Amino acid sequence: MADLSRRNFLKTTGVVAASLGTLSVAHAQTAERKWDEAHDVIVIGSGFAGLAAAIEAKKAGADVVILEKMPTPGGNSIINGGILTATGCPQQKLHKIEDSIDLLEKDILVAGNYMNDPKKVRLIAEAALPNYEWTVKELGVEWLPDAIGQEGGHSVPRYVTTKNGSGSGIVTKELEKIKELGVPLRTRTYVAHIIRGPEGVEGVEVREGYRFPDANSGKQKFIKANKGVVLCYGGFSADVPYRTIQDPKLTADLDTTNQPGATSELWRDTSAIGCLQAQNDWIQCGPWGNPREKGMGIGWQYNQTAAAEYGLWANSKGKRFVNELANRKVRADAIMVEQANGNKCYAIANEPNVKALKAQRPGFLEKMLERKIVEKYDTIEALCKAVGIDEAQLKKEIAEFNEYVKAKKDPKWGRYINNDQVPMVEGPWYVGELQPKVHHCMGGLITDVDTHVLDVRTDKPIPGLYAAGESVGAVHGAVRLGSVAILDCLVNGRIAGQKAAKGQ
């Protein structure tokens, strides 16, 4: 009897063992599987990248379905800040900002500590202007026509902002496009496993009617992919157990900007079926978070768009402690060091220097004041007394900084001085507290420039498997520059959809 059982086992798993080595047999046994339905292309995730992939796959003639585990579409993208790197755009030209593809490429590589795949970086840098034009002409996204901003780590201002001040300004247009194209989007459809057979990825096992976060909820179903599966499942910043495995410092004490569904199930599952991954422990904290609100919130927009770009950041001793426009890791680490030394950190700006925020995010500052996320004071003396900042030292720092603004050069911190910035003299004055929050996963699946996911043993593409967006590593390296995520997601999402539709 033992021999018979052993023969049956070898018979059913031999071909799998030859093809997949020591990978999970449960994921690979597909020879006798009964599929409940089939589509040419299955897209997992409904954020920027997934929707872009679905649009392109459908336009290429494929039968496409989008699977989203949460009750509503959009993921982190729909609560994203809505800022897009757009080198060469009309807004840059309006403000006479000199920029180039080469400079954008260099900034991404430098911030990434050259841990990026240079081919991928060049690809998205070259696509910055065509991608912006695609969002306007193909999707009808509305961007502020005269506003251009600068995130930390960028050499010059180069991001455009959606009119509604949110990533929803892009996602809703993508959703309208997939509806127009007739692409079904199924919410509450949890992908339990990606099914890989001897010849590549064949489909997925899902739970329809899933209720987050119960992995056993819903009804089991198997969906076949005739041409390919596109992985756009995002990051895991909301998954405390998994993120602390990768980086033990990111405990539950740190809030996250991400929506609750940013968890690790498919990061684990792709590992189990032999997908090559790297740099998963490089997890970015957004330095501009505000502790007076949960999640992404809106306070970051004052801390970044007003104070980092036009004002200054200071600790409770009244001292500037970092280049306010350094990359996110540099700034987040600096805040954490200050906190470890018993200091709080604050973003400070005066009335003339909040003009850009008011122009880019109409009504947002008023909301922050109403919710007491940001405080407003008539004088710098009143601000210091109320918040607990050393008044004499802060006045000294402001006076020194004002000289840098006049000279358009900051020799102390190397800070870029915006062309529109003016010395901080007249009140009223605004202040918001700074608190890093877990924000973005730089690591992930390793793909080639055509978005094929690579095999962990051979470094060769896994047939039928593509990926784009935050699920993919080696694009941003050690640090992702703000406003480059949407660029990455849309450009590579579109490529993935085109390739999957053709089965290439």
Image (spheres, rainbow, N blue to C red):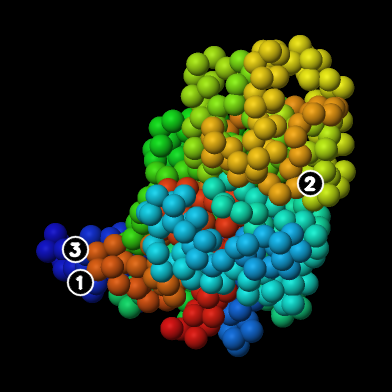
Amino acid type of the residue that numbered disc 1 sits on in the rendered structure = Ala
First-in-chain label (2 vs 1): 1
**Residue 502 place in picture, x, y as percent:** 49, 86
**Residue 431 place in picture, x, y as percent:** 75, 27
> Where does label 2 land, which residue?
356
Residue neighbourhood size for the residue with mark 2, other residues' Cα within 10 Å, grouped as few (<14), some (14–19), many (≥20): many
Q: How many marks?
A: 3
Residue neighbourhood size for the residue with mark 3, other residues' Cα within 10 Å, grouped as few (<14), some (14–19), many (≥20): few
**Residue 175 place in picture, x, y as percent:** 73, 68
Dot label at residue 5:
3
Amino acid type of the residue that numbered disc 3 sits on in the rendered structure = Ser
**What residue is at 72 percent from the left and 77 percent from the top?**
138
Residue neighbourhood size for the residue with mark 1, other residues' Cα within 10 Å, grouped as few (<14), some (14–19), many (≥20): few
Q: Which residue, as the protein is rendered here, is positioned at the far left?
A: 3
* Residue closer to the observer: 398 or 346: 398
**What residue is at 44 percent from the left and 41 percent from the top?**
242
Labelled pair 2, 3 in contact (Cβ < 8 Å) = no
Indicate the secondary structure of the residue bearing disc 2.
helix
In the depicted structure, whether residue 281 falls above or below residue 234: above
First-in-chain label (1 vs 3): 3
* Residue closer to the observer: 216 or 302: 302
* Residue closer to the observer: 312 or 504: 312
> Where does label 1 land, which residue?
18
Indicate the secondary structure of the residue bearing disc 1.
helix
Q: Classify residue 91 by image quadrant.
A: bottom right
